[in-house]
C-alpha cells in the first residue's frame, strides 16, 4: 500500500539568522549616523551591518538566510560589534553559531562591584563572603569576612590579592591549620580560574612577582597542578575564637566568568553559635 504522507525533510530552523535579523532591525540608523531615507523595514540594512563588520554584504545576507556556512569566531566578533550586542547577546550569538560560549576575554576589575552585588554579600551577615577576580584580587567583602578572615580595607587595593597574602603575610600562615596544603590548593585553583577567564598576560606578571618573592610558590607553580576550587572545607585558627571549621562554596557572577563569589558557612552548629556570639559582641 502506498504511503501518501509527505516525508520531505523540513529545513531546520535558522536560529542564528533569525537572531541576527532581529538584532539588526532593532538598531536605529539615525543614532549611528546613517542616512534614514525611505526604508521598507525598521533597523539597519544588511549591507550596513556588513560594512560595520567589514565583511561581504553577500556573505552576510547568506548568513542571515542560513546558507552562508559557518563563520569564523573573528567574523562573529566583528558582527557582534557591528550590531552593538550586549555581553549576554554576544555569548548567545556564539552558542547559536558554534554550540558553546565564546572564548573568555579577561577584563580588568575596575568599577564592577555594583551596590546590588554588595547587598548580596551583606545579606549573609553570619557567613564571611567575598567577590574575587580571576587573578584572585579581593574586590568586595562583608563584615563577617573582616571579622573572621581578614580586614581587606586595611590593605591597599593592589595588595588585596589572595596569593600575595598567602605567600607573604605571616598572619595568614599562622591562621592556617595546614598552610602547605592550603597553599597548594590555592595555587591549583588559581591556575584553573585565571586560564578559564583568559587572563594570560595577568597571570604572567603575577606569577613572576610571586616566584621572585616566594620559593614555595615557585615550586608549587612548577608542579602544574590544576584543581577545582568550587567547594571544600577551610580550617583556620582565629586569634579570639580559636579553631574554626568553615565550609566554602563558590559561585560565578552571571555574565562575568572572571568574577567569583565565595561564601563560608560554619561546618557545625557549635561553630555557628560561637561565630554568632562573636559577631554580635563585635557589633556592640
Image: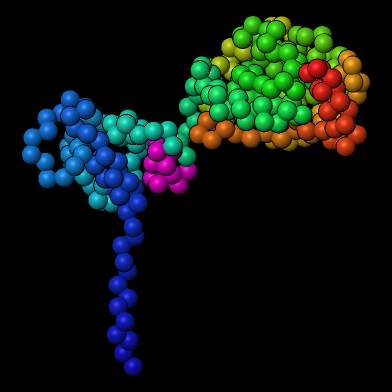
Residue 268, picture quadrant:
top right
Quick one: 119 or 227, which is closer to the camera? 119
Dominant SS of magenta comes to helix
Q: Is residue 128 left or right of residue 208?
A: right
The residue located at (35%, 34%) in the rendering is 85
Q: Inspect the magenta stretch and tell me whether residue 246 lies in it.
A: no
Q: In this view, does 18 lie above or below 175?
A: below
Query: Horizontally, is 55 left or right of 154 in the view?
Result: left
Q: Which of 94 and 92 is in front in this view?
A: 92
For the point 40% across and 46% down, the residue is: 96
Q: Is residue 87 left or right of residue 25?
A: right
Query: In screen coordinates, is 116 left or right of 33?
Result: right
Which quarter of the figure is the N terminus placed in?
Answer: bottom left
Q: Where is residue 76 in the image (x, y as percent from the top left)?
A: 34, 36
Counting from the top left corner in percent of width and height, residue 92 is at 42, 42
Residue sitting at x 61%, y 19%:
139
First to last magenta residue range: 89-100
Give the quadrant of residue 229.
top right
Horizontal and vertical percent position of residue 113? 55, 22
**Residue reaching furthest left?**
38
The answer to which image quadrant residue 93 occupies is: top left
Q: Which residue is drawn at 38% across and 45% down?
A: 97
Q: Can residue 191 be seen in this view?
A: no
Amino acid at each position: 500500500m502506498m504511503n501518501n504522507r509527505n516525508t520531505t525533510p523540513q529545513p531546520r530552523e535558522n536560529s542564528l539568522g533569525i537572531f541576527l535579523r532581529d538584532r539588526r532591525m532593532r538598531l536605529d540608523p539615525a543614532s549611528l549616523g546613517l542616512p534614514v531615507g525611505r526604508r521598507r523595514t525598521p533597523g539597519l540594512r544588511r549591507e550596513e551591518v556588513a560594512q560595520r563588520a567589514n565583511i561581504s554584504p553577500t556573505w552576510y545576507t547568506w548568513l542571515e538566510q542560513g546558507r552562508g556556512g559557518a563563520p569564523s569566531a573573528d567574523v562573529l566578533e566583528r558582527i557582534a560589534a557591528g550590531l552593538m550586542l550586549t555581553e549576554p547577546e554576544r555569548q548567545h550569538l556564539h552558542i547559536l553559531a558554534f554550540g558553546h560560549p565564546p572564548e573568555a576575554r579577561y577584563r580588568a576589575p575596575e568599577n564592577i562591584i555594583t551596590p546590588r552585588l554588595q547587598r548580596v554579600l551583606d545579606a549573609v551577615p553570619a557567613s564571611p563572603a567575598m567577590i574575587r577576580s580571576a587573578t584572585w584580587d579581593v574586590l568586595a567583602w562583608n563584615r563577617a569576612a573582616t571579622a573572621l578572615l581578614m580586614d581587606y580595607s586595611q590593605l591597599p587595593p593592589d595588595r588585596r590579592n589572595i596569593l600575595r597574602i598567602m605567600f607573604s603575610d605571616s598572619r595568614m600562615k599562622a591562621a592556617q591549620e595546614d598552610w602547605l596544603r592550603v597553599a597548594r590548593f590555592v595555587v591549583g585553583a588559581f591556575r584553573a580560574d585565571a586560564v578559564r577567564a583568559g587572563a594570560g598576560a595577568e597571570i604572567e606578571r603575577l606569577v613572576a612577582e610571586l616566584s621572585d618573592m616566594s620559593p614555595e610558590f615557585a615550586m608549587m607553580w612548577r608542579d602544574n597542578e590544576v584543581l577545582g576550587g568550587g567547594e571544600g572545607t577551610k580550617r583556620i585558627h582565629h586569634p579570639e575564637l580559636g579553631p574554626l571549621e568553615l565550609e566554602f562554596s563558590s559561585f560565578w557572577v552571571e555574565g562575568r566568568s572572571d568574577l567569583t563569589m565565595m561564601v563560608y558557612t560554619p561546618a557545625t552548629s557549635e561553630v555557628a553559635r560561637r561565630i554568632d556570639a562573636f559577631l554580635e559582641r563585635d557589633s556592640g
